[in-house]
Amino acid sequence: MEPGEHEVMGRAEERHWWYLGLRDLLARVLAREVRVPRPRVLDAGCGTGANLRLLRDVLHPAYLGGFDAEPEALELARAKVPEADLYLGDVCDPEVRVDALDLVLSTDVIYVPGAERARPGLLRLAERLERGGLLVLHVPAYRWLYSDHDVAVHGTQRFTAREVRALLSGLGLRVELLTYRLCFLFPLVVASRLPRLTRPGAAAAPARSELHEEPDARVNRALLAVLRLENAAILAGARLPFGSSVFAVARKP
């Protein structure tokens, strides 16, 4: 990740509509799908800690762990969730500090190394899941939507829903929920990518994340409201046919 991006991300995830919308969906899905009281939970690629805090507040886990490959991210995460077991780690070769897990969460992590490099680590995590345990995965969608943010965080692979299903099934997991996200806002997402899509040599150009520019507060509230409506549709059973992210919940049989 480019220098300074973790600090920007740590601030943005507290108030930016994209992060708030994702955590709204996570909170609703986890409250419904995690069937174990006080589960053992691991955030694989915990970043700057907002999802760890959500896991703590929603699930009251008996064990809450998280790893990240970046020391700067872990420092910010510790400030948000000091009671979590946080340590340096790589999703491609993860350390798991408990014998078994009930939930593994990984949001926008495996697209950095790519599916092939991450597969052995994901298999190790899936093997540590108890029967009935969940792997919840969130990744960016569509290679042609490659963005300045992807460049800034060194992302290498965006996914289709079909690729995510094949990945999870190959880990021996049963896919129970698979959908695109930001379907309702997709035209705006595509419009925001047009300068990079139409600029010669843009894919190799240095970039900084779009998160450096905070949205207007009214725009932020409006976009979050749209995402909450979309989340309600997903919880009601809608499976959205396109979007800028893929969201999946898979259970160990």
Image (cartoon, rainbow, N blue to C red):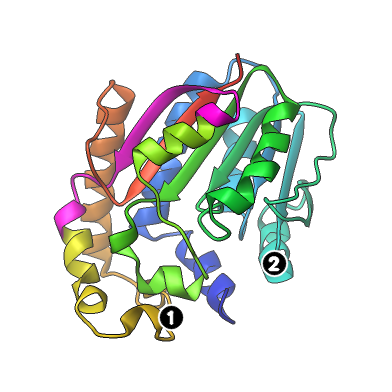
Rendered residue at 14%/56% (across/down): 187
Q: Nearer the viewer, residue 75 or 159?
A: 159
Crowding at mark 2 (Cα within 10 Å: few <14, some 14-19, many 20+): some
Is residue 182 rendered magenta in the image?
A: yes
Disc marking residue 101:
none
Real-space Cα distance between discs 1 and 2? Answer: 18 Å
Crowding at mark 1 (Cα within 10 Å: few <14, some 14-19, many 20+): some
Q: Secondary structure at mark 2?
A: loop
Is residue 5 rendered to the left or right of residue 20?
Answer: right
Is residue 57 rendered to the left or right of residue 176?
Answer: right
Is residue 13 rendered to the left or right of residue 38?
Answer: left
In this rendering, the answer to whether 208 lies above or below 37 is below
Q: Nearer the viewer, residue 143 or 9?
A: 143
Quick one: label 1 or label 2, which is nearer the N terminus?
Answer: 2
In this rendering, the answer to whether 191 lies above or below 205 is above
Q: Looking at the rendering, which quadrant does residue 15 occupy?
A: bottom left
> In the rendering, at what x and y percent does residue 62 appear?
76, 28
Q: Nearer the viewer, residue 62 or 111?
A: 111
> In the rendering, at what x and y percent does residue 170 appear?
55, 30
Q: Looking at the rendering, which quadrant does residue 28 occupy?
A: top left
Q: Which residue is mark 2?
A: 70
In magenta, the rendered stretch is 169-187
Rendered residue at 36%/36% (across/down): 162
Q: Which residue is mark 1?
A: 208
> In the rendering, at what x and y percent does residue 88 appear?
78, 59
Q: Quadrant of the C terminus?
A: top right
